[in-house]
Amino acid sequence: VEKHGVVPKQCWTEPLVSQETLQFNFWLNTWHRQSAKRIRDLHAAGQTADQIRAYIDSDLLPELFRFCCAAIGRPPAKFTFEYAATAASAGGATAEADAAAGGNKYRRIGPVTPLQFYQEHVKPLVDLGAQVCLVNDPRNPYYRLMTVDMLNNMQGARRVLYVNLPSEELRRLATDALRDRLPVWFGSHVSKGHSRTAGLADPNLHRLDLLCGLQLNTMDKKERLLYGDSLMTHAMLLTGVTPPDPAAGSPGKWRVENSWSQDYGLKGYLTVTDAWFDEYVYEVAIDKARLTDKMRAVLEQDPIVLPAWDPMGALAQ
């Protein structure tokens, strides 16, 4: 995003392939394996490293680019974004700006490049470069910096680093951000204790112990990670929170926006409980300015390097 920018969805319609990526990824993986064989064949035939790099640049990368553009399209070089501003989205708009727009809340941005749009209209509200990945990994000590070997999937991007914290700190920081009207990106094991049709997630949603006497909740979060029973599988967006009400016996609840179309859950949204958050949410992205001094100091540490196959890196695979 910081290199190429962003485009509003209204200005670049999302193709079907980007919503249903299974077949696309299948073909893409096959292409990468075939390309790896081509490179190995060149090396076996005596080609030098410079010759192989030239082949990658002149043949393989253009081939990959064509395939991706055919599947998901190519973003526009420039676009114009028009919208009717609400009281919440008008920001610091002045009466003069409203008058210039014909007395209404009509707004027009552009023509701009995707990078200009991000730098001028998105970054002042959400600076992606300032986001810090906080994780809850009870296998490793808290208030330690971690990374995963070979995790980065973008050449030249900043190194992926995790600040390992107790789950209650992730919940507290996410709650504070939501109170300031800022949604929170998070990574979780989405299929655990989750009903796609009802749009609900709770560790005790499926009571197999009552149905057939099968106990499936005997491991804690640390044990599930150690025995390969849980990992990060999906990213979603926290958009609202209801704190727990002990007097009414009501648990804390979170409103989550998913990307599985409006046919999923409640028009694309689901409700998850605090208990589900603690058990199956592993990562949240929070602005660095919201961290405590103790948390920010962790970023100066030398990170614990987890192996490439570690569940903490599963979301980027």
Image (cartoon, rainbow, N blue to C red):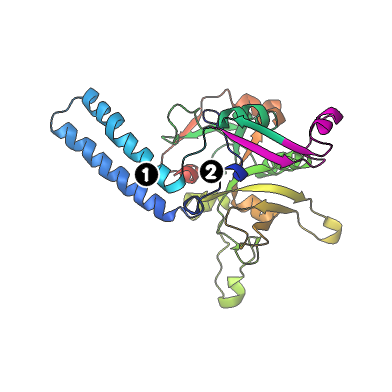
* 3D distance between C-alphas at marks 2 and 1: 41 Å
**Is residue 104 in the magenta section?**
yes
Question: Which residue is denoted by mark 2 in the rendering?
Answer: 139
Q: Residue at x 55, y 29 (%)?
A: 2
Position of 60 with respect to 105 (left or right) is left
Give the x, y percent position of residue 116: 60, 27
Residue type beneath disc 2: Arg
Give the x, y percent position of residue 238: 67, 47
Q: Quadrant of the C terminus?
A: top left
- Judging depth in this view, the residue of 244 and 218 nearest the camera is 244
Q: Residue at x 82, y 33 (%)?
A: 98
The reply to whether dot 2 and dot 1 touch (C-beta < 8 Å) is no
- Judging depth in this view, the residue of 161 and 266 nearest the camera is 266
Residue at the far left in the pictured view: 45
Vertical side of 312 occupied by 19: above or below: below
Q: Which residues are magenta?
A: 78-107
